[in-house]
Image (cartoon, rainbow, N blue to C red):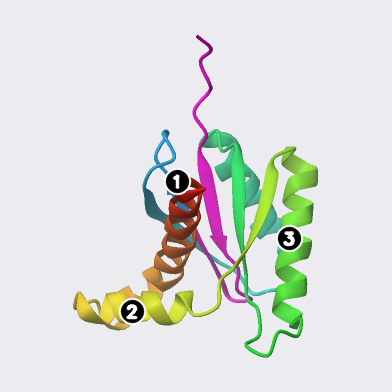
Amino acid sequence: MTSTKPERFLAIDYGTARIGTAVSDPLGITARGLETINWNGQDSAWAMDRLVALIEDLQITTVIMGLPRRTDGKTSDSETKARAMGEALAARTGRTVIYRDERYTTVLASQVLRETGVRGKKRKAVLDQVAAEIILQEYLESQRKA
């Protein structure tokens, strides 16, 4: 009987002001919001260093990068930047990066927070984490169905 090493996933909800992150449990079953990286969209080295540190500290095996796709199917500037960040993360960490369509995850996250009574500054602080959590949970569930 061979034993397989557990996989741990990090999801990224890329944005030009905030990057939401979520992590799976060590068995790759559930997702939980991790942190929101606030950045100005310009200092990508700082944001990249923080993401690399999370990947290494948490022993992440696979990164799930949300792609902010347009509803008309055309490639947006944000999608191009998210792909570039994913490629840079793969190059720096040697981890696999899987891209997932993240359309509507922020809308869903906002709805969840509204329904749970999270408002104001608290909502803004965790919105991108919840979006990353949705991206990751959807990915984990798709793998169980496959």
Task: Please give the label number shown on residue 121.
Answer: 2
Q: Position of residue 26 (x, y in %)?
A: 42, 34
Task: Please give the label number shown on residue 144.
Answer: 1
Evaluate whether residue 19 shows in this view. Answer: yes
The answer to whether 6 is drawn above or below residue 97 in the figure is: above
- Write down the region rendered in magenta: 1-21
Q: Where is residue 95 in the image (x, y as percent from the top left)?
A: 69, 40
Q: Looking at the image, which residue is at 19% across and 78% down? A: 117
Q: Do the residues labelled 1 and 2 touch (CB within 8 Å)?
A: no
Based on the picture, tell me whether residue 18 belongs to the magenta stretch. Answer: yes
Q: Which of marks 3 and 1 is nearer the N terminus?
A: 3
The answer to which image quadrant residue 134 occupies is bottom left
Task: Please give the label number shown on residue 132.
Answer: none
Classify mark 2: residues with Cα within 10 Å, few (<14), some (14-19) or many (20+): few
The answer to whether 20 is drawn above or below residue 68 in the figure is: above
Q: Is residue 44 left or right of residue 125?
A: right
Q: Where is residue 146 in the image (x, y as percent from the top left)?
A: 52, 48
What residue did someone put label 3 on?
85
Classify mark 1: residues with Cα within 10 Å, few (<14), some (14-19) or many (20+): few
What is the number of callouts on the image?
Answer: 3
Badge 3 marks a residue whose secondary structure is helix
For badge 2, the amino acid type reads Lys
The answer to which image quadrant residue 103 occupies is bottom right
